[in-house]
Amino acid sequence: MRLFVAVLPPASAAEELEEALQGLRDDRLRWTGPAGWHFTLAFLGEVRDEVLPELHTRLARAAHRTAPFSLRLHGAGHFGDRALWVGAAGGIDAMRMLSERAEAAARRSGVPMGQHHRYTPHLTLGRSRDIRRDHHEQGSGDGLRPYLEGLASFEGTAWPVTELSLVRSNLPTSGIPGEQPRYETVAAWPLEGRPEGSG
């Protein structure tokens, strides 16, 4: 099954983001919806069934070692002209650590992981319908400027991240253009570590 490890925003954060997107959405992007909003910590791809028990054990251990932390949706960014995202603020160092632990758990469970890159927390809002470039500077994000400007001052309310989730991605099968993947949380573990400096 196709899996990733994620932090899922609560309904209250999703509602604030929905409000911020009012008037910004148009048909130039394929927009994601609240049901698909998440912060990917580690993308695992196709995972063999026999790996799952070990993966669950190691992810549970990673969650157990990590203290809950505060997060809020914040600002916006882009990957070239292809994707628009909203960022995060608050416990970013803790989130990066959790991402590294999730990656290590997957690797040690036998999941082939790609090269490690510095983690950039992002929640994908929309993807370009046309990957051809309409301007000279490839990947500059110029085509996304109206959305970036509209979300530049967006600041969500902080919430406590208390759970690590393993999510299954069900790719579209209908053949309908623009159909989004469906996401299903297959397991979740509480963050149970002690905050730094406590004890």
Image (cartoon, grey):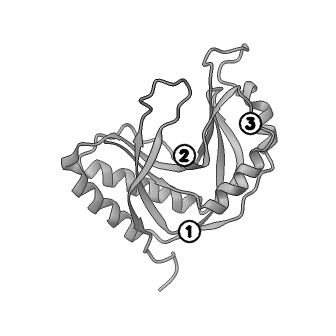
Mark 1 Cα shell of 10 Å, populated few (<14), some (14-19), many (≥20): some
- Judge left or right: residue 187 versus residue 181: left
Q: Residues within 10 Å of mark 2 (few under 14, many from 20)?
A: some
Secondary structure of residue under mark 1: strand
Secondary structure of the residue carrying tag 3 is loop
Q: Is residue 79 left or right of residue 68?
A: right
Give the mark toward the camera: 1 or 2. Answer: 2
Mark closer to the chain start, 1 or 2: 2
Residue at 54%, 23% (x, y): give it.
177
Q: Nearer the viewer, residue 93 or 178?
A: 178
What amino acid is at disc 3?
A: Arg
Q: Of marks 1 and 3, which one's residue comes earlier in the chain? A: 3
Residue 45: image quadrant is top left
Give me the C-alpha separation between circle 1 and circle 2. Answer: 22 Å
From the viewer's side, name the closer residue of 133 and 194. 133
Q: Residue at x 75, y 56 (%)?
A: 155
CB-based contact (under 8 Å), mark 1 and mark 2: no
Q: Position of residue 3 (x, y in %)?
A: 37, 45
CB contact under 8 Å: marks 2 and 3: no
Q: Amino acid at mark 2?
A: Gly
Question: Residue placed farthest to the left in the image?
Answer: 50
What residue is drawn where x is 66% and y is 15%? 133
In whole angstroms, how far apart are the C-alphas of marks 2 and 3?
16 Å
Q: Which residue is mark 3?
A: 25
Q: Nearer the viewer, residue 52 or 15?
A: 15
- Relative to 15, is 193 above or below? below
The residues bearing labels 1 and 3 have C-alpha atoms spaced at a distance of: 31 Å
- Residue at point 65% right, 23% down? 139
Residue pointed to by mark 1: 69
| Residue holding disc 2 | 36
User: Horizontal and vertical percent for residue 15?
Assistant: 69, 56
Q: Amino acid at mark 1?
A: Phe
